[in-house]
């Protein structure tokens, strides 16, 4: 009788402990919806954490791969620690490769692949930057072939034209020795066309207006540059990167006005 009573007490204690300590797992569909909402509202760190939790349970969930790649690229660009920045850029590239493997036809996969390669190129030497520029253009073009209304891909290609037409001496020499010359087809006219299209498709994206202002300034179209930079300053900043681009836009704005 004492044994039976003791057993009952033990079972009650175990059951009660389990009820108090067990944390019910958030349903995957709910977690996906929350992650997408955070992503849409540019809550980058929280979105990235949510997507990584999703991938622990479902490694085939494509949106988590390409969106996490983009978040790693964006957050890495905000970091002051050079080594940590490199780690984030490497993760961005790894996640982009996984996204491209899952859906090689998707515009978003090619887009983040181009972005990830572009970020890594920023901290690489002249040879690596020139080599990456060719692949970046390829992925930007393939993204637009898959979706002509992809604002990010238009920005990526516009930025490619902007940067390639402004390569420094070391990068031009690297292009000459490695590839026999600069990548073909780069022009400021194409840069403007794609950057303008990006701002038309995503008019609230600060970076797109900033780069459009830079392109106009490069072409000495001061009035258009001022209008684009003014748009940057009027928009609401949602991320540290937005604030940084607004500071740069303000500096350029007052230097040319």
Image (tube, rainbow, N blue to C red):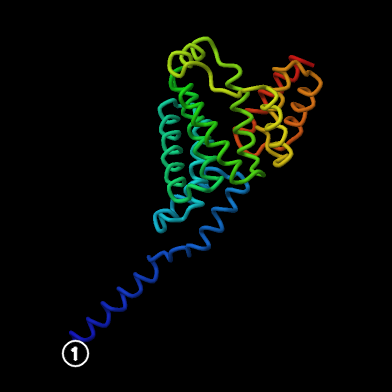
Residue 50 in view: no
Compared across the picture, whether 63 is left or right of 12 comes to right
Identify the residue at image location x=47%, y=27%: 132
Rendered location of residue 210, percent (x, y): 68, 28
Residue farthest along the right direction in this orientation:
223
Taking the image as shown, residue 91 lies to the left or right of residue 183, namely: left
Q: In this view, does 153 lie above or below 9?
A: above
Q: Which of 244 and 59 is in front in this view?
A: 59
Q: Residues within 10 Å of mark 1 (few under 14, many from 20)?
A: few
From the top left corner, tell me how far across and down residue 226 is, in percent. Answer: 78, 23
Q: Where is residue 98 in the image (x, y as percent from the top left)?
A: 42, 46
**At x 51% / y 30%, what residue is drawn?**
118
Residue furthest out toward the bottom = 1
Q: Is residue 252 left or right of residue 173?
A: right
Q: In this view, does 174 lie above or below 19?
A: above
Label 1's element?
loop
Rendered-image quadrant of the N terminus: bottom left
Q: Tell me residue 99's x, y (percent).
A: 46, 47
* Residue 65 visible to the viewer: yes
Of residues 25 and 39, the one nearer the viewer is 39
Circle 1 sits on which residue?
1
Q: In which quarter of the image is the C terminus?
A: top right
* Mark count: 1
Quadrant of res 159: top right
Quarter holding residue 222: top right
């Amino acid at each position: 009788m004492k044994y039976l009573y003791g057993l009952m007490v033990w079972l009650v204690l175990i059951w009660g402990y389990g009820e108090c300590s067990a944390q019910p797992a958030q349903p995957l569909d709910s977690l996906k919806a929350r992650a997408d909402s955070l992503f849409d509202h540019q809550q980058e760190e929280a979105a990235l954490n949510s997507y990584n939790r999703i991938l622990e349970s479902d490694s085939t969930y494509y949106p988590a791969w390409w969106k996490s790649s983009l978040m790693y690229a964006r957050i890495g660009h905000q970091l002051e620690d050079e080594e940590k920045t490199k780690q984030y850029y490497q993760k961005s590239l790894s996640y982009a490769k996984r996204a491209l493997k899952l859906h090689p036809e998707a515009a978003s996969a090619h887009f983040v692949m181009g972005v990830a390669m572009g970020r890594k190129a920023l901290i690489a030497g002249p040879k690596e930057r020139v080599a990456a520029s060719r692949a970046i253009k390829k992925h930007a073009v393939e993204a637009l072939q898959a979706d002509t209304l992809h604002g990010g891909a238009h920005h990526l290609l516009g930025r490619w034209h902007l940067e390639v037409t402004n390569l420094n001496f070391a990068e031009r020499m690297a292009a000459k020795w490695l590839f026999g010359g600069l990548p073909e087809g780069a022009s400021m006219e194409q840069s403007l066309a794609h950057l303008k299209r990006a701002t038309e498709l995503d008019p609230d994206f600060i970076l797109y207006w900033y780069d459009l202002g830079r392109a106009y300034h490069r072409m000495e179209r001061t009035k258009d540059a001022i209008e684009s930079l003014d748009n940057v300053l009027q928009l609401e900043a949602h991320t540290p990167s937005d604030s940084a681009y607004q500071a740069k836009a303000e500096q350029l704005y007052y230097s040319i006005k």
